[in-house]
Amino acid sequence: MPVTPVTLEGRFVRLEPLSMNHLAPLCEVGLDPELWRMGLSVIESQDDMTSYIATALQWQSEGTALPFVTIERSSGTVVGSTRFANIDRMHRRVEIGWTWIARPWQRTPINTEAKYLMLTHAFETLGCIRVELKTDSMNEKSRNAMLRIGAKEEGTLRNHMITRGGRIRHTVYFSTTNDEWPGVKRSLEEKLARPFTRLA
């Protein structure tokens, strides 16, 4: 699995390798408490965002993650971030996660196409046999988004994590496998080909 920094580009979104050069534009859109209400991370300041990026880059240097900055192609605006993480070369699996998109760009094609680009790269370039996603059991919006892209819900890990606020989180796991990918890919391409209407 040649997991190296790469730019992934579609009609609506460009995923570029994350770097500290993205600190200022990420702060412009990412210091919104609502974005982090259900997350394990809480980004309230430039220092928090600096630590967030530094951790992602440290994981990349260790070979366990490949972080991206999410850019709206039409405007060139940085709108969020996402990454491959928990990279397991032996078992040919990765996780897509640590995804956040600023609220003005939510319920647009940005997230759908970003997932399409990442899944395509995972299955067709990296040769993965499994791509995982996970979310807080209380995060209904995230759970619905994972189902909408075609991932299968697998189950819930109870008392899995403790949030920064001290709440005990149950984590719901989803996945797509290499044999499911052709059908998931067709479905995503059909969604992305439709005239855009903001999702509820």
Image (cartoon, rainbow, N blue to C red):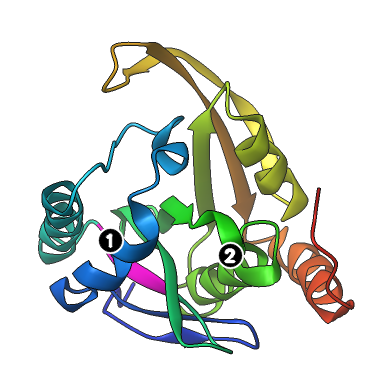
Report how far apart the C-alphas of labels 1 and 2 lie in the structure: 23 Å
Figure check: 173 above or below 82: above
In this orientation, which residue lies closer to the viewer: 45 or 113?
Answer: 45
Residue 198 coordinates in the image, percent (x, y): 80, 61
**What's drawn in magenta, residue-wise?**
65-70
Mark 1 residue type: Cys
* Residue 60 in sight from this viewpoint: yes
Callout 2 crowding tier (Cα within 10 Å): few <14, some 14–19, many ≥20 = some
Instruction: Determine which residue is flagged by label 1.
Output: 27
In the depicted structure, whether residue 23 falls above or below residue 102: below
What's the mark number on residue 115?
2
Is label 1 or label 2 in front?
1
For label 2, the SS is helix
The rendered magenta stretch, by its main secondary structure, is classed as strand
- Do the numbered discs 1 and 2 sit on residues whose CB atoms are within 8 Å? no
Considering only order in the chain, which callout, 2 or 1, is on the residue closer to the N terminus?
A: 1
Classify residue 173 by image quadrant: top right
Q: Would residue 172 be counted in the magenta stretch?
A: no
Residue closest to the eye, 32 or 68: 32
